[in-house]
Image (tube, rainbow, N blue to C red):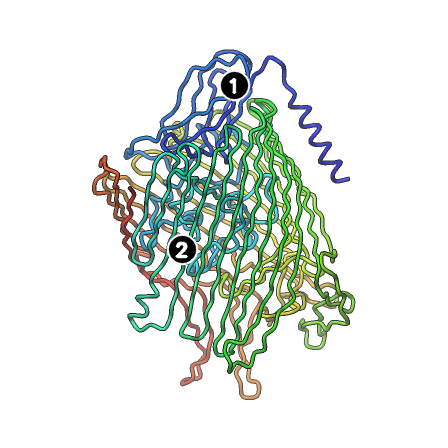
C-alpha cells in the first residue's frame, strides 16, 4: 500500500512536469577555475525569463527554457560573476569555471545563493555559512571552529560549557544527523567541546537544517548538519597549516593526474598533554584527526570520490579514570550524469564510533561501539524550468556493542565479559519535488517511508505484562523488573519491525522582491538513541536501537516565517516561529545505572517531549563591518506520565524542562576588516542557565545525612555568558609569492567569567553546614597561532 502511494505520487509529479517540445535544456558543472573543485550553491540567473537555479552539492545545474537567445549570469560569493550571451536552440552542455575575487576589505558574510534567493525559495529553517566567514570569527587558541560558528545561529545552543555536541530547537544531541561527506559522525567534538572534529582547512561547504527538512534526510528528529570536504586542487600542489599553542595542523593537496584527478589530506594533533607532564600535572588530554579525499574524473559524465576520516581523543584524570573515543569512516561515491536533466549520486559508506572508559579504583576497562554500513542512491531529475524531482533509496545495517568488559589489571576483581551485541537494519525510500507554481508561489513537498528491523542473534528478556520497569506502590518508586524468561532469536531473524510514513512540505509566498512569508511541516522518525544521563557526551556514550521497550521517536514540527531584505541585500531579516512535538521520548527512572547495563530497558520509560519558540536573525551582509545578531526565545519540556491510574510517572507525570532548555539565547557576531593587513572578530553570547534539580531539604538516616531533592529540573544554573575576541594580522597581503602567512591572536572569555557547568551540594566536614559549590571548566583562554599556505 505504501509503495503504491509513493509510486502514485511519482507518476503525478512526472505528469505535471511534462513540458512543450519547443523548450531546450542548458546544463553542466560549475567549478573553481584555479582548482576545478565543484561549487555548491552557485546561482544561474536568466534575466529575460526571470528564472534562476542553483548548483547542487556536486556542482551540477540544469535549467529548461524556450528556444531563443539569452543573457546568462552566474554568481557566487567571493567569486567574479560570469556574464555571457548564449543562444539556446538545442539541448546544450556547458561547464563553467569561476575565478576568485582578489581580496578586498568588503566581504559578504552569509552565503546566499543569488540575490533574493532567501526570499523566493521555499527553503526555510536552513542556515548556510561560508568557510571564509567562519575563518574570520574569533578562534579558540587561534583555530577557527565550525561548531562554535553554528552555536551563534538562532535556535542552536549547547547544554553547558564543556558539553559536546549541540542542541537544536529544544532537541537532544542524539537528534542531530551530522554528516561529513555523507557519512554519519556520532561525536562532533574534541576535548569536551573545546574543539570540533571538523578541520576548517578541508571543509568545502556546510548547511544546517533545523526544520523543513527535505525527504532525502531521515533517521533523526532535531536537525541535519550536512558538511562536505574539499576535493583537492587538480592543477597545482599546495601545502597549508597552522601552529598554535595547543594544537597544530597541516594539509596538502594537488593533482594525481592533472585536470583529471586530485587529492587532499589534512591532519591535526594537540600537544597540551606534553606541557602538563613537564609541569608534573597528572591529568592528560589530547586528540588527533586525519582527513583524506581523492577524486577522479572518468569522463564528462562520470566522476568517483573516496573520502576518509579518523579522529581520536584520549583523556586521563589524576589516574582516577580515563576516557577514549574515536570516529572513523570511509565513503566511496560515484556521480553520474545520465542526460542534461538527469543526475545521480551513489555512495557506499562505512562508519564507526568507539567509546571506552577505564575506572581505575574499580579496576574496570569498558569499551563500546556502534558501526554501520550505509548504501545510498539518489536521483535528481530536472523535469522543467518549474519542476525538479529528487528521489532515491537508503539502507543502513547497524552493529551495536553495548559493552566489552575486561579487568584493568591482574589485581582487579572484575571478570571479563561481553554484553550481548545488537543488530538492526534501517531502510528508506523517498521522493521530493521542488515546484514553482507561479512567480510568487513555490513549493517543496515530498514523502519518505522508513522501515526499521531489529535482527538477531540475541536473547530477549520477557517480563510480566511486557513491562521491564515495575512500580512499587508502597514506596512509590520505580525499579527494575525481573525477567520471567528469555526468547532466543537466531542470526538475522527479525525480532521486531517498525515502519513510518514521513511527509514533508515547505511553501513560500513572495510579497514582493524583498519580502516573503514561508511555512513548513515535517514528520521525522528516529530509531537509534543515545543512552546518557549526563549533558556531556563523554564519559558515557551508549547507542541503542529501538525495540519492544525502547520505542522509535516520532516528531512533528510546524514552522512559520517572515523574511525580508533591505538596501539591495545589504541587510536581511529572518524571523521564524516553531512548534514541535515528539512521541516516545525515552526517560530514565530515578537512580538509573547505565554503564555495563545488560538490560537497559529496565531503567527506561517512554514519554513525550515538546518545544516551541521564536527565532530572530538580523544580518549585515556587506561592508567593512559584517555579522549578525540572533535571538531565540524558546521552551523545551518533557513529560512521562504513569502507564496506568496507579502510577505517578516521572515527576508525578507533569511537564518539566529538558536538561538542554534555554529560555533566552542571544548572540552577537561581528567581523571588521580594518585594512588589508588587519581584521578583527568578536562574539558575545548570553544564554539562560540550563535546568537543574536542587535539594529542598535533608534528613538523617542511620547517622547519614541524605538530601531530599525537589521536582525534576525545577531550578536553573546561573546564566551563561562570555565575550570572545580575535585579531588577524596578514603581514604581506599583496604578496605575489607562493608563501602566504598570517598571525591570529585570540582571547576566549575576555572578562574571565566563571560559567557554571554544574552545582554540587555537599556537607562541610568541619562545620556540618550544607554547601553549594559551582564547578566551572574554562576561564579566560588567550591564544596565538600562525597560519601559512604555499
Q: Earlier in the sequence, mark 2 or mark 1?
A: 1
239 displayed left or right of 325: left
Say if 576 sits above or below 196 in the image: above
| Quarter of image, res 73 | top left
**Are discs 2 and 1 less than 8 Å apart at CB?**
no
Q: Is residue 130 left or right of residue 442?
A: left
Q: Is residue 419 visible?
A: yes
Query: Along the line of sight, which residue is nearer the eye, 470 or 734?
Result: 734
Quadrant showing the N terminus: top right
Which quarter of the image is occupied by the C terminus? top left
| Rendering coords of residue 451 (x, y %) | 69, 48
Q: Residue at x 63, y 37 (%)?
A: 392
Residue receiving disc 2: 195
Identify the secondary structure beneath mark 2: strand
**In the rendered view, would you say 292 is above or below 778?**
above
The answer to whether residue 524 is left or right of residue 128 is right
Nearer the observer: mark 2 or 1; the answer is: 1
Image coordinates of residue 415 in percent, x first then y, are 59, 78
Instruction: Specify the label residue 92 is tagged with.
Output: 1
**How far across and how far down the image is residue 648, in percent?**
68, 67
When the figure is inspected, residue 622 is found, relative to residue 636, above or below; the finding is: above
150 or 790, nearer to the observer? 790
| Secondary structure found at label 1 | strand
Q: CA distance from mark 2 to mark 1?
A: 46 Å
Q: Which mark is residue 520?
A: none
Residue 55 percent coordinates (x, y)? 49, 30
358, above or below 103, in the image: below
Asked whether residue 619 is in view, the answer is: no
Amino acid at each position: 500500500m505504501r509503495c503504491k502511494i509513493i509510486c502514485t505520487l511519482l507518476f503525478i509529479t512526472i505528469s505535471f512536469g511534462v513540458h512543450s517540445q519547443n523548450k531546450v535544456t542548458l546544463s553542466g558543472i560549475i567549478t573553481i577555475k584555479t582548482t576545478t573543485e565543484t561549487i555548491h550553491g552557485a546561482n544561474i540567473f536568466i534575466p529575460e525569463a526571470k528564472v534562476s537555479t542553483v548548483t547542487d552539492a556536486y556542482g551540477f545545474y540544469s535549467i529548461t527554457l524556450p528556444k531563443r537567445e539569452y543573457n546568462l549570469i552566474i554568481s557566487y560569493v567571493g567569486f567574479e560573476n560570469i556574464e555571457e550571451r548564449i543562444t539556446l536552440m538545442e539541448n546544450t552542455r556547458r561547464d563553467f569555471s569561476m575565478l576568485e575575487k582578489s581580496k578586498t576589505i568588503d566581504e559578504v558574510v552569509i552565503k546566499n545563493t543569488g540575490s533574493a534567493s532567501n526570499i523566493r525559495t521555499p527553503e526555510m529553517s536552513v542556515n548556510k555559512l561560508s568557510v571564509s566567514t567562519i575563518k574570520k570569527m574569533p578562534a579558540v587558541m587561534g583555530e577557527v571552529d565550525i561548531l562554535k560558528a553554528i552555536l551563534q545561529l538562532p535556535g542552536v545552543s549547547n547544554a553547558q560549557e564543556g558539553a559536546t555536541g549541540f542542541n537544536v530547537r529544544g532537541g537532544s544531541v542524539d537528534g542531530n544527523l551530522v554528516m561529513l561527506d555523507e557519512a554519519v559522525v556520532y561525536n562532533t567534538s574534541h576535548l569536551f567541546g573545546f574543539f570540533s572534529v571538523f578541520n576548517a582547512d578541508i571543509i568545502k561547504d556546510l548547511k544546517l537544517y533545523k526544520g523543513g527538512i527535505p525527504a532525502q534526510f531521515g533517521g533523526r528528529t532535531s536537525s541535519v548538519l550536512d558538511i562536505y570536504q574539499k576535493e583537492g586542487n587538480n592543477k597545482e600542489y599546495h601545502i597549508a597549516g597552522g601552529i598554535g599553542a595547543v594544537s597544530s595542523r597541516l594539509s596538502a593537496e594537488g593533482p594525481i593526474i592533472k585536470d583529471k584527478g586530485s587529492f587532499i589530506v589534512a591532519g591535526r594533533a594537540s600537544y597540551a598533554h606534553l606541557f602538563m607532564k613537564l609541569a608534573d600535572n597528572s591529568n592528560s588530554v589530547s586528540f588527533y584527526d586525519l582527513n583524506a579525499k581523492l577524486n577522479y574524473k572518468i569522463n564528462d559524465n562520470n566522476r568517483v570520490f573516496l573520502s576518509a576520516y579518523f579522529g581520536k581523543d584520549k583523556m586521563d584524570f589524576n589516574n582516577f579514570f580515563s576516557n577514549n573515543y574515536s570516529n572513523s569512516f570511509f565513503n566511496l561515491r560515484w556521480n553520474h550524469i545520465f542526460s542534461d536533466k538527469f543526475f545521480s549520486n551513489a555512495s557506499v559508506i562505512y562508519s564507526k564510533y568507539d567509546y571506552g572508559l577505564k575506572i581505575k579504583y574499580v579496576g574496570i576497562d569498558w569499551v563500546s561501539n556502534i558501526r554501520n554500513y550505509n548504501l545510498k542512491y539518489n536521483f535528481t531529475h530536472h523535469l522543467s524550468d518549474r519542476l525538479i524531482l529528487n528521489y532515491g533509496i537508503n539502507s543502513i545495517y547497524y552493529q551495536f556493542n553495548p559493552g566489552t568488559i575486561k579487568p584493568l589489571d591482574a589485581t582487579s576483581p572484575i571478570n571479563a565479559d561481553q554484553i550481548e551485541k545488537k543488530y538492526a537494519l534501517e531502510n528508506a525510500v523517498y521522493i521530493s519535488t521542488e515546484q514553482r507554481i507561479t512567480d510568487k508561489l513555490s513549493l517543496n513537498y515530498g514523502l519518505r517511508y522508513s522501515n526499521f528491523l531489529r535482527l538477531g542473534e540475541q536473547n530477549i528478556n520477557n517480563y510480566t505484562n511486557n513491562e521491564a520497569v515495575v512500580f512499587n506502590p508502597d514506596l512509590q518508586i520505580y525499579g527494575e523488573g525481573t525477567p520471567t524468561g528469555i526468547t532466543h532469536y537466531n542470526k538475522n531473524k527479525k525480532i521486531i519491525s517498525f515502519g513510518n510514513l514521513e511527509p514533508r512540505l515547505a511553501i513560500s509566498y513572495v510579497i514582493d522582491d524583498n519580502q516573503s512569508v514561508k511555512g513548513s511541516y515535517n514528520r521525522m522518525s528516529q530509531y537509534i538513541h543515545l543512552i546518557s544521563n549526563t549533558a556531556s557526551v563523554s564519559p558515557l556514550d551508549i547507542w541503542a536501537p529501538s525495540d519492544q521497550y525502547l520505542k522509535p521517536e516520532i516528531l512533528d514540527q510546524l514552522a512559520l516565517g517572515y523574511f525580508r531584505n533591505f538596501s539591495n541585500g545589504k541587510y536581511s531579516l529572518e524571523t521564524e516561529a516553531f512548534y514541535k512535538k515528539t512521541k516516545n521520548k525515552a526517560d530514565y527512572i530515578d537512580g538509573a545505572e547505565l554503564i555495563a547495563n545488560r538490560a537497559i530497558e529496565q531503567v527506561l520509560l517512554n514519554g513525550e517531549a515538546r518545544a516551541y519558540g521564536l527565532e530572530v536573525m538580523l544580518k549585515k551582509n556587506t561592508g567593512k563591518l559584517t555579522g549578525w545578531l540572533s535571538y531565540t526565545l524558546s521552551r523545551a519540556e518533557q513529560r512521562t506520565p504513569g502507564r496506568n491510574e496507579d502510577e505517578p510517572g516521572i515527576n508525578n507525570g507533569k511537564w518539566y524542562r529538558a536538561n538542554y532548555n534555554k529560555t533566552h539565547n542571544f548572540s552577537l557576531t561581528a567581523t571588521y576588516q580594518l585594512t588589508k593587513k588587519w581584521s578583527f572578530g568578536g562574539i558575545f553570547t548570553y544564554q539562560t542557565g540550563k535546568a537543574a534539580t536542587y535539594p529542598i531539604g535533608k534528613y538523617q538516616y542511620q547517622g547519614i545525612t541524605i538530601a531530599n531533592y525537589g521536582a525534576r529540573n525545577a531550578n536553573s544554573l546561573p546564566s551563561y555568558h562570555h565575550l570572545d575576541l580575535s585579531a588577524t594580522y596578514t603581514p604581506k597581503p599583496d604578496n605575489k609569492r607562493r608563501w602566504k602567512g598570517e598571525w591570529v591572536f585570540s582571547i576566549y572569555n575576555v572578562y574571565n567569567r566563571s560559567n557554571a557547568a554544574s552545582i554540587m551540594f555537599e556537607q562541610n566536614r568541619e562545620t556540618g553546614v550544607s554547601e553549594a559549590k559551582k564547578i566551572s571548566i574554562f576561564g579566560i583562554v588567550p591564544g596565538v597561532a600562525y597560519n601559512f599556505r604555499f
